[in-house]
Image: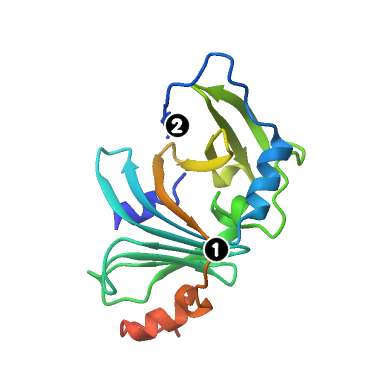
Amino acid sequence: MKTLRFAFAPVIASICFALPAAAEKLSLNELSTYLNSLGTVQADFVQKNDDGSSARGVLTLKRPGRMRLSYGGENDPLVLGSGGQVGVFDPGSNEPPQRFPMSQTPLSLILANNVDLSRAKMVVSHTEQNGDTVVRAQDPEHPEYGSIDLIFGDTPVLKAWVIHDEGGGSTTVQLTKMRLGGTVRDAEFNIRAEARRRGTPIE
């Protein structure tokens, strides 16, 4: 389950595409508006862990507050976020999913009902790298929860994120084939329902 833990442990890796040297970083207001405009999002992803391992899967976001990282078929590793919690499902375990508060993961910053990157002390760096805008953000009240680097193309479009955990670990998730809109049932994010389906119910 190290692969799954890395998904929330908080890399900065540049997703570099050559653009003119005159490219300017996008403003925090532009990026906040873009993130708040996202409703349902699906994308393929490649996850690169700091131990050199990697994994592929499908990301589904349903803002605010819902997230699904599927690493394969219906009985493969899975991470669900809903109801203010994150559940990590390990197909090699007969135990209920590991659970912890969504607020303790940096991804809660982009799943919030209202994303405001201009909030005091939330953004600790805001740079342009090879045509991309890179924002490092953290919970200003709990920096010990780690930080997230959000990497945006110039549209803007979210291209990748890098999560840094409190122990110095880092993981990159690069997004491709992003699809916006559509309908995804809330049941797809339900941690208790998934645990029952897998025969590892939560008490």
Q: Amino acid at mark 1?
A: Gly
Query: Which circle marks residue 132 in the picture?
Result: none
Res. 37 visible in picture: yes
Q: CA distance from mark 1 to mark 2?
A: 29 Å
Q: Which residue is mark 2?
A: 12
Q: Which residue is mark 1?
A: 181
Q: Residues within 10 Å of mark 2 (few under 14, many from 20)?
A: some
Q: Amino acid at mark 2?
A: Ile
Task: Give me the residue at 26% from left, 72% from top.
Answer: 93
> Height in image: 56 above or below 20?
below
Task: Give me the residue at 38% from left, 86% from top.
Answer: 196
Q: Position of residue 146 (x, y in %)?
A: 54, 43
Q: Position of residue 53 (x, y in %)?
A: 24, 43
> Height in image: 136 above or below 200?
above
> Height in image: 194 above or below 47?
below
Q: Position of residue 167 (x, y in %)?
A: 44, 40
Quick one: SS at disc 1? loop
Quick one: SS at disc 2? loop
Q: Position of residue 33 (x, y in %)?
A: 70, 46
Dot 1 or dot 2: first in sequence order is 2
Task: Give me the residue at 57% from left, 30% from top.
Answer: 133
> Height in image: 201 above or below 116?
below
